[in-house]
Image (cartoon, rainbow, N blue to C red):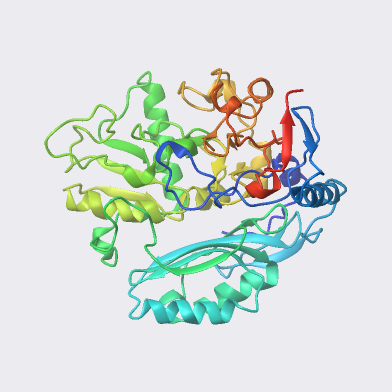
Amino acid sequence: MSLAAPFAAPFAAALFCDVAVAPAFVRLPRLRTSVGGEDGAGDEPVFRHGGPRIRARSASAGGGRASLAVSQLRRRKEGGSSATRGCAALSSGNGADSRRVSGGDFVVVSFYRFVRVENPEEEVAKHLAFLKDLDIHGRIYLNAQGINAQYSGPLADARSYFEWLRENDRFSDILIQISPALSGHAFPKLKVQFKPLVQVDGGIAHLPLLNTSMRATPLEPSEWKKRVVALSRSRDASSGNVDSDCIILDLRNGYEWDIGHFQGARRPEVDCFRSTSFGLSETEVNDSDPLADVNKEKTDVLMYCTGGIRCDVYSTILRKKGFKRLYTLKGGVSHYLENEGPVEWVGNLFVFDSRLSLPPAAYNPRSATQTCDLQHAIKNEKFAKCYLCGSVVQELRHRNCANLDCNLLFLCCPDCVSSFRGCCCSTCMTAPRLRPVLPGHQRYEKWHLYRDLEIQPS
């Protein structure tokens, strides 16, 4: 598909521009993590707002740190930014796909490829050597099974890296996915490591990921659209009854589902992807398992995730368990939104970087006119609800609990943010290591910027 449509006014209007906590790969039992750094490194938070009053201590050596933090925050508040304003054209090389990216010339790039890498440690060294002179931040994982990368950087540097990668025959046709970075880097630093491409209980080294016949059949976004629209019409015609011969399976975490998903999709009631075990039980039926009692020979299982890699991994597991008719959404939800818009999709897309949540218009500007009434579309009572009071949240972005030692990632309405001072419960409100309530959905900084500040109730 051509990416020629500019990210202009509709995109800017639709995008939530507040910055939230930057998540790393999913290792989130009970979701208590800063998802991005030990203490949630990122852009400077603004201290002064309608929440608790914060007073910097100046009688200790720590006062210097607090003063420095406040001065940094003032600069940011006055308009300082590391991002270059304006628009820039970008071609990912996927075809006739140049587009314009608003919000500065920083972009976020993601790709993966399962392919045999004979000497992954040497490959890591090569990538580090190439990247050392580029302004690239992100996570690039390599091992004997291939590569998985998400990174941000200026337009030219971002392109230089994936074009260099494509010079290698193993990666010449790799699908590159690009989205606007909003404000400078979307990751705090660069990590190029030899490690598993995806975190799954039991690891992935033993899985036949290099055998394409063991992975699910990829469906182009256009074909996926046809399938999900047909299923939707079938549900409507049968008063909501689900087609027993086809199931849409969401392979993402609970918090990803909470802000957006395909209508009619199902997922197990677990918080964390890495511990998902649906379809794997041989001896007992789990009521929360969407694949319990599914006919493995005849049922079409349509799987989707953010970018596609988790579906490829889990499809090999399900294939070994006897599931025959497995299909994945090629390139994941991000690729679908870019090509087809939010057809049968409701809400935003959770992304694993400082942006945290993107509306469909971030991938396809035409989606700005394809708005959806959330009150009408939300049929699942667990979708888009405040963690504390259960009301429908209007801004589909998570925040981290202000208690550093909790750091729960949760959805929260403005009233509860104020009442609970950014915490997820009354217990956390009295914790010893409290951070300030951030306005909007910004990222928390490192703890040392807060430990010498005195937070008092307003």
Residue occupying the far left of the picture: 283
Q: Let me know if residue 344 appears in the view.
A: no
Q: Let me know if residue 315 appears in the view.
A: yes
Q: How many marks?
A: 0
Q: Position of residue 330 (x, y in %)?
A: 42, 55
Closest to the observer: 426 or 253?
426
Residue 121 occupies quadrant? bottom left
Residue 291, placed above or below residue 210: above
Q: Position of residue 236 (x, y in %)?
A: 41, 23
Residue 134, placed above or below residue 36: below
- Left or right: 449 with respect to 397? right
Residue 242 occupies quadrant? top left
- Identify the image quadrant of the N terminus: bottom right
Residue occupying the far front of the picture: 59
- Left or right: 115 with respect to 47? left
Please give the name of the residue rendered at 35% of the width and 47% of the height, measured from the top-left corner. 274
Residue occupying the far right of the picture: 78
Q: Position of residue 317 (x, y in %)?
A: 24, 52
Closest to the observer: 418 or 131?
418
Please give the name of the residue rendered at 53% of the width and 25% of the height, measured from the top-left corner. 387
Q: Position of residue 177 (x, y in %)?
A: 55, 60
- Identify the image quadrant of the C terminus: top right
Please give the name of the residue rendered at 82% of the width and 44% of the height, measured from the top-left corner. 58
